[in-house]
Image (cartoon, helix red, strand yellow):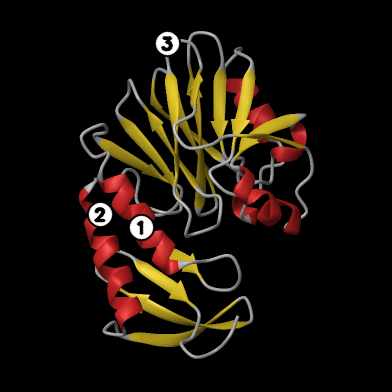
Amino acid sequence: MADVIQINDTAWRIEDNGVRFFLLAGTKKAMLIDSGMNTPNAKQIAESITKLPIMLLNTHADPDHISGNGSFDYFYMHPDEEDNYRAHGGAGIIMPVKENDIIDLGNRPLKIIFIPGHTPGSIAVLDINSRVLISGDTIQDGNIFMFKERRNLSLYIESLKKLSMYTDEFDTIYPSHGTFPVSAELIASLIEGAGQIINGTANGKVIDMFGTPVMFYKFPYAGFLCDIPGIKK
């Protein structure tokens, strides 16, 4: 069962068995950011928190972020993520968002930052007035999935470098996994670790993930689960 934890007067995190998603309230609307792994009732959870009209925005479309999408007639997602969403059985109408789009909840503008790599259409959400970055899976101190199709470690590094350019615009990061919250200093560490994986200087070990052998690289600040070098996806 999901646990609802209030962050402040206008923000909540919903903890759903290792993944979290968020509800942000403005003066006119509220926004769910992702809809969990085991929460087809995500919209109903949000409606129990606020009386404002509720919209949905997905940071990306891995299965642990879309379980409640079916309750919405439409939702916001980057168009490059549609193939990933449909491949996981996702239905409904996608309202496309792109780099630098602003969604205003009423005195609460949310800025879209396109950060491909973890998935083709991953986005981060800058809660401008609150000075918070909601990072999806891209920034976290847990184990970051970078194996099988649709993952691109080089693009992931470029997206992290892009986010590092925004660090004067946010004070804290809300990740979908791992510790909550995390600081902007984690970005540089993730760039360094991913770079070591690409250049072959990181030490990893083969483990099993859902029946797939993957290479696990464990750093002090996070882990990466990657394809085994030399084995095609």
| Residue identified by numbered label 2 | 186
Residue that appears at 40% across and 17% down: 9
Query: Is there any visible trace of residue 225 in the rendered image?
Result: yes
Please identify the residue farthest to the bottom as the structure is shown: 230
Q: Who is closer to the viewer here, 228 or 115?
A: 115
Which marked residue is nearer to the observer: mark 1 or mark 3?
A: 1
Using residue 3 as the reference point, say whether residue 205 is left or right of it: left
Percent position of residue 100, x then y: 44, 32
| Residue identified by numbered label 3 | 107
**Three-letter code for the amino acid on which mark 3 is drawn:** Asn
Residue that appears at 20% across and 34% down: 168
Give the number of the disc on residue 147.
none
Local SS, label 3: loop
Up-down relation of residue 55 to residue 108 (above or below) = below
Q: Who is closer to the viewer here, 69 or 44?
A: 69
Residue that appears at 49% across and 29% down: 101
Q: Which is nearer the N-term, disc 1 or disc 3?
A: 3
Could you give the CA–CA distance between mark 2 and mark 3, rounded to whole angstroms? 29 Å
**Three-letter code for the amino acid on which mark 1 is drawn:** Glu
Query: Is there any visible trace of residue 37 in the rendered image?
Result: no
